[in-house]
Image (spheres, helix red, strand yellow):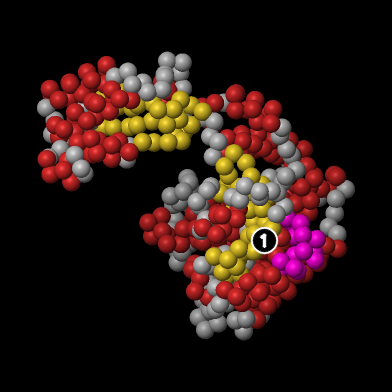
Amino acid sequence: MKKLRLIAFFLCLILVLPLGACGESTNVTPSSTVAITKRQTGNLKAVAMSTEHFSFNRGEMTYLYAISYMSFLNKYYAYLSAIGLDTEKSFKEQKSTFSEGTWFEFFMQQAKDYATNYLLFCEAAQELGLSLDESDKAFIQEEKKLLSEEAASYGWNVATFLSQLYGTNIEWQYMESCYEKMRLAQKAYDHLIANKQFSDEELEAEYKKNPNQYAVFDYYHVDLGDGEDLSDELIAACREGMEKALSFEDFRTVVKDFLAKTRTTSDLESMGGLESYTDKYLSERLIQGESYMDNDFCRWVFSDESREEAVFQVESETTKATVAYCLMKKPHRDETPLVDVRHILIGLKAYGGNYEEISAARQEAERVMQEWLEKGGSEESFADLVSRYSSDSGSVSNGGLYANVEMGDMVESFNNWIFDESRKAGDYGIVETPYGAHIIYFVRKSLRWKVQTDDALFSEFYNSTRDSFMEKYPIETKDEVLNAINW
């Protein structure tokens, strides 16, 4: 199975953002145009980054910079003032709160990272004898066609639409050449990396090698200072009680006595008495599925000294009272079921879609599904249709993928379909929800600990491969060309 999470990070951004995914951040309408505030002048064909056989010029790097910036806006638009980013001023003059240096340097570094990945994998493709074929060329022309149609819907040509979308004079030619390198890099990525799989034995070995990284545990956590003005005697009694506690019942008894001495009669009566109050108090302090953190408690939990229902206590820095932990389940594998699915939402108008009635949305979903089946019914062809038809802006940028979905994350009908016990890889269907009709493609099911160990091994494999490419295909970067980009 392909490692979809890295494909999404590595390659997908170029595909979607130009096609109207501007959302709240750009506010593009036919009657409300914005000035080109970041006009690029000078030689846009000057080479900015290059390897032996491939390069990115200043125009292309402006596009990658814009992709980085637009992606950031789509995520943080509502928080720009809190973040400290003024979109009306030069980014070269504003200190970034997300990294050292300026906001210009922050977005430029991401653009350079994109370009670096494309250059490295294009060189790998060249060495493997891979090249663009007719399907790649058709894909790029289809993207241009969709872009033209989107522009026409506002009464604009492509150049005007792009200027409105990005606030700078990006031309299609630079986008097109980026598409070409992206598609070629994708071929090498698919050939060398995407289908890398790890055996159950390798996952098991990784888990045993780094249990602190993957295991989870359950415990109760109570602060017996709890905001009260406590006497030294009560603090001492709580501490002594916890030191003697050998079971959860002992732990609960100390907590109950503490509550009896610190809560009013009306508080207790409102909850049905002391026993009921104690149970509710503890239920709100049960932590399940906690991961390792670098503190005394976790070090104890993961040591041979810990045992279930044993109590570990520390002193609160503020109240000097006892903070007590009762370990209920020692470190164990996280067996939470997870699924990966792709979907295309044929949405209702009430939620940003195009259809008034669910019946009409269902009919369109059936038509789109048939189109997909006629194209071969593969996962890749399904992902290709997402940007064209789906009204779910949150998943358009990664081919409609929702990865590592837990039970209950989705609305009921969607959730019931993907967590059907009979569900298997390659299943597909149409599910109706309050948002519209969803065409769903089931990718896989797994367990959280397996997903985590697989991700770790895959990242290690990807990084080692990329590092070897960095040595094999050196990149020349001309910062003076990059710094000439106006933003």
Q: Residues within 10 Å of mark 1 (few under 14, many from 20)?
A: some
Q: How many marks?
A: 1
For the N terminus, the quadrant is: top right
Asked whether, in this view, residue 69 is left or right of residue 381, the answer is left
Residue that label 1 marks: 429
Residue 322 position by quadrant: top left
The reply to whether residue 371 is in sight is yes
Check residue 318 for magenta coloring: no
Q: Residue at x 21, y 24 (%)?
A: 238
Check residue 379 for magenta coloring: yes
Q: Residue at x 12, y 22 (%)?
A: 233
Which of these two is toward me, 47 or 349?
349
Q: Which residues are magenta?
A: 368-381
The reply to whether residue 295 is in sight is no
Mark 1: secondary structure: strand
Q: Position of residue 443 (x, y in %)?
A: 67, 50
Q: Residue at x 20, y 43 (%)?
A: 272
Q: Position of residue 223 (x, y in %)?
A: 26, 32
Q: Position of residue 350 (x, y in %)?
A: 49, 74
Main secondary structure type of the part rendered in magenta:
helix
Residue 284 position by quadrant: top left
Asked whether, in this view, residue 363 is left or right of residue 433, the answer is right
Q: Residue at x 42, y 26 (%)?
A: 298
Which of these two is toward me, 446 or 273?
273
Task: Give the residue furthest to the right.
Answer: 129
**Amino acid under disc 1:** Gly
Residue 360 position by quadrant: bottom right
Which of these two is toward me, 191 or 363?
363
